[in-house]
Structure formats: structure tokens, C-alpha cells
Amino acid sequence: MEFSRKWHDHYPTEIPPSLEYDEKPLYAYLVESAERHKEKKALHFLGKDISYGDLYTESKKMANYLQSLGVRKGDKVAIMLPNCPQAVISYYGSLMAGAIVVQTNPLYTERELEYQLNDSDTSVIVCLDILLPKVTNVRNKTSLKHTIVTGIKDYLPFPKNLIYPFIQKKEYNMVVKVEQSGDTHVWKQLMEKSSDDYLETVIDPRVDLALLQYTGGTTGHPKGVMLTHFNLTSNVQMSEAWLYKTSKRQGVVLGVLPFFHVYGMTTVMNFAIKLGSKMILMPKFNALDVLKTIDKQKPTLFPGAPTIYVGLLNHPDIKKYDLSSIEACLSGSAPLPLEVQEQFEKITGGKLVEGYGLTESSPVTHANFIWSDRINGSIGVPWPDTDCKIFNMDAGGEEADVGEVGEIAVKGPQIMQGYWNNEEETDNVLKDGWLFTGDLGYMNEDGYFFVVDRKKDMIIAGGYNIYPREVEEVLYEHEGIQEAVVAGIPDPYRGETVKAYVVLKEDYSLSEEDLNAFCRKHLAVYKVPKLYEFRDELPKTAVGKILRRRLVDEETSKQTEVTKTV
């Protein structure tokens, strides 16, 4: 079958099907924006503004300090922070020092943190003060040499900076006192004494890694996705082309999506820095706080996930706030319900469209057109210089016919180099330059793509990727469990909810509360099952494989019956 890029026929004249890409390090975008807009506001954080000039200066100080600690080109620096100025400064400062950033979820348990630090061979971590006990507990089991500690209050305006420690004590029931030592470094002291005269490192954008972004593993352990400077800069430039109206005016970007996730990192942080836009940082999602922020700060671009938009739409006070500044929203991480799209567009007057991507693709590969033709229920069309094919899994890897369901594969400059220290998994998904996504879908006759199911058993709950095998391994560690299987069942708000089906050992008694407490000790909060069902046996194939899909189908049928009854 001759390969045809039918989607190009639908591109508006403002979006070129091919771009000329920058051959420069990712941090060059901060350097250029600081030179063009030195006094312009770069970050807004809980009432405090930071200019591009100051952001650049502090990033250089971070680069200098990291180099003084012995960080050299190719070393790993983990960033375990929510959205705050320190997350942006640490990220760009690490890249300037020649380091590879390892984004680390602040919700990780000690077990998960230890694995990631060891797998990546990370030498320095930047973390919040309230996370220091967790880091300290795993430190001697890892390759960590230095810990840089900061707090939310470090970038709060007066008098919030004085009040916040009391709020922190009430919310987290802890006060962490951090003292400067040989291997523990206090952020404020670092910034006071460090010079901005760092040693520039020669970077080959197409070869040198900028990021190790960990993604869940169906075989149990997360995998480190290797993304070069060029992978990331190309996806940022694609974003700029797709959002041409916002790009021309620079706009104001709302940063609700976490930067430790590649989606927020690219479509919010790197995109805003590239344009020289003002970025509004929100450390966590709270519907009322987001509504107030939109009303006051007037963002024009709002990348998000369906659960975020649903949370706002369901807030009882939404009509009290002016959301009309919103011009464009790119939704990812999970399917976007039509009613959510229509309601949000009606309230804001802006456009909300669905996109698609993976950690392995930096992350965006597809999206619907924001100011042109779109198809509801579709993930849209491939971005500039991005190719997509549907491969028939039952026909020896041949390309599927139009309308035929198969595995989605993508190719483009944003595709990863492979998985860190994992050639086997790399070879499984990268073939002749094509990234096999593990998602099932089809292309219609106009070149629009649709996702219909997941080849893997990954669960997407509230925008988070959760892999059943990882949760199951924790369940099997409990002395009272004989068999366990985890599945994602339909949930009207979160998209899917994690449910565990458990068979107990004979004469063993265990409650849902007991299991929940056990899981919370070993898993990040978003991975902990929300539902537990105890069974005498689990459905299996003739060779003993548990039929996860049958359990999901049973759950769907039960929900359907309840709906009919209601």
C-alpha cells in the first residue's frame, strides 16, 4: 500500500506540514527570551512575579552551583518538585550545566524513589523540605551524593512567606528544619552565594540527552525514556505551529499540569519559555483556586486533562468567575468527553480540542485543529513532520486498510532514542524508526485518527498512567493474598478507576481497610486501588492466565444494568 499523508489536505494555511528545526540546546530558548524580554514577567507564583532576566540569572546560578558539586556533562539531576519557580530554575540550570534531568514525581513512595534513583544513577536531587525525610531514608541505598532542599515559602511574597510554615504544619503535620552541610544544600543559601558565571558545555542537540522521563512498565518496573535536546525542541516548535494564534501574541499560559509529567513540561513550561510568554504556576489542582486564578490572571492558553475540565465545570461557583480570557485548550492523557468539550467552550468562549501522545514522543504526536476542522471523538491528525500508520497485527505487520483497527505507530523528530539501559524493551517498540505505541486505533478516509482500545493493560485514572502489574506485585507481597489481579474499570469522572480483585489464602481474614492501608505504604496515592473485591477464584484460561478483560467486561455490564434500572 502506498503511504499517503491524507491529513495534510486538512491543514489550514497557517500550519506548514513541515518545519525548519532549531539545532540548539533546549535551554537556548530561555537565553533568547531573557535577551529579548529581560524585564517581562516570566513566572507568576501565588502572588509573586519573576522576570525573564531574573529567571535566567537564577538558572545560571543553579548551573554554577551544580558544577561546583562536581556535576559534569551527562550526569543526572533529579527534580522532585511541584510546579513552582524552583522547578523551572532547577530544570534549565541542570541543562545549562550539561546534566540530564530526571523528573521525579513528588508522590512517589520510598520504594518507587529508590528504584528510579538507582536505575538512572542519579547523583543530585532537588526536593521540597517536606520530602527530605523520604529522600534521606533511601539515600544510602542509592548513588545520591548531594541533596538540594527548598520550600514553597522560598518564593512567596511577604507576608505569605511568613504565614506558610504554619499552613504547612497544619496540612502536613510536620516541620522540617534543614541545615547546610557537606552533602545537604539549602536553596536560599545556594542562590545567595552562587555566581552566575557557569561553564558552558558543548551540546549536540541530536545526540545528547536532556531528559530521562520515567514511564510505567507492564513488566513491573518503570522505564527511563531517553529524550534528546532535539526531541524536545522539535515538539515545542510543533506546538508553536499548531497554536499559531496564541504563538503570535505570546499570550499567558496556565500551568496546572505538573512539569514532572512530560505533557506539562512540553506544552506549558518549554512552550512558554520558547515564546517568552508569562507562565502561571499552580503547585496542585484545586478547582476553586484555578477559577480564581483564571479570573484574575487572564491566561489565554490552558493545556489540561479531561478530569481538570470536569472538576471546573462541576464547581458550584463557576459562574461567579470570568473565564473569557481562555482562547485555546489542548486536552490530553485521556479521552475527552463531548459534553465536557461543549460545556467548557460555551463557558469560556475558547476552543478545547483533544490531542494524543506518549512519553516516548516528547509527548505530542496528534491533535485536532483548534481553529479549523475537527472531528469529535478523534485524536485528530499527526503534527508537522509526524507520520502515523496503523499496522494490522494479524497480517504479519502490514499496514491496515482505511477504517481497519490495528496498532498505532508513529515516526518523527520527537520520537525517543530508546529506554535507558533496556535494549530489549527498546527493540520491542522501535522498529525501522517507527514507535509502536501499544494503542489500538484506526484512520478514517480523511486521515483523522481514532483510538479504540489499549493493547496493553495500562489504566488511565485522572490523567495518571497506572500499570496493573506494579500494583499487583505490591498486593502479592501481602502474606494473606493468594491471587490478585488489578484492572481499570469505567469511571465517569476519572476515566478509569483502579480495582483490585483478590483471592485470600485459606482461613485468612482481611478487610478492604487493611488492604488499602497496606497499599498506601508501598504505592503512590494515585496508584492505590479505589475498590477491592474478594473472590473465591479468578477467571482463567486453560493455561492458568487470569482473564483481566473478563473482569472489566463484568464490571461494565454491572454498570450498564444499574444505569438501566435507574
Image (cartoon, rainbow, N blue to C red):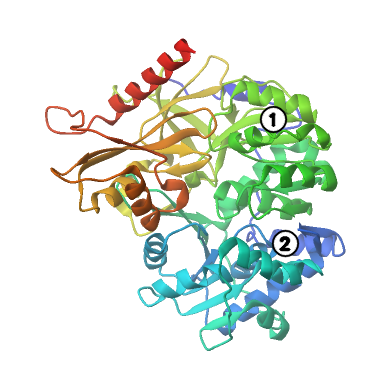
Q: Is 281 on the left or on the right of 405, as rendered? A: right
Front-lying residue, 214 or 293: 293
Numbered disc 2: secondary structure: helix
Label at residue 522: none
Residue most extreme to the bottom: 182
Front-lying residue, 452 or 82: 82
Q: Residue at x 76, y 51 (%)?
A: 275
Numbered disc 1: secondary structure: strand
Q: Quadrant of residue 339?
A: top right
Front-lying residue, 98 or 137: 137
- 3D distance between C-alphas at marks 1 and 2: 28 Å
Residue 20 appears in view: no
Q: Position of residue 411 (x, y in %)?
A: 49, 38
Q: Identify the amino acid type marked 2.
A: Leu
Q: Residue at x 34, y 53 (%)?
A: 518
Label at residue 30: 2
User: Which mark is first along the chain, 2 or 1?
Assistant: 2
Q: Identify the amino acid type marked 1.
A: Leu
Q: Quadrant of residue 499?
A: top left
Residue beneath disc 1: 352
Q: Is 549 on the left or on the right of 372, as rendered? A: left
Q: Position of residue 122 (x, y in %)?
A: 45, 70
Q: Residues within 10 Å of mark 1 (few under 14, many from 20)?
A: many
Q: Position of residue 501 (x, y in %)?
A: 29, 36
Q: Residue at x 67, y 64 (%)?
A: 167
Q: Is 362 on the left or on the right of 270, as rendered? A: left
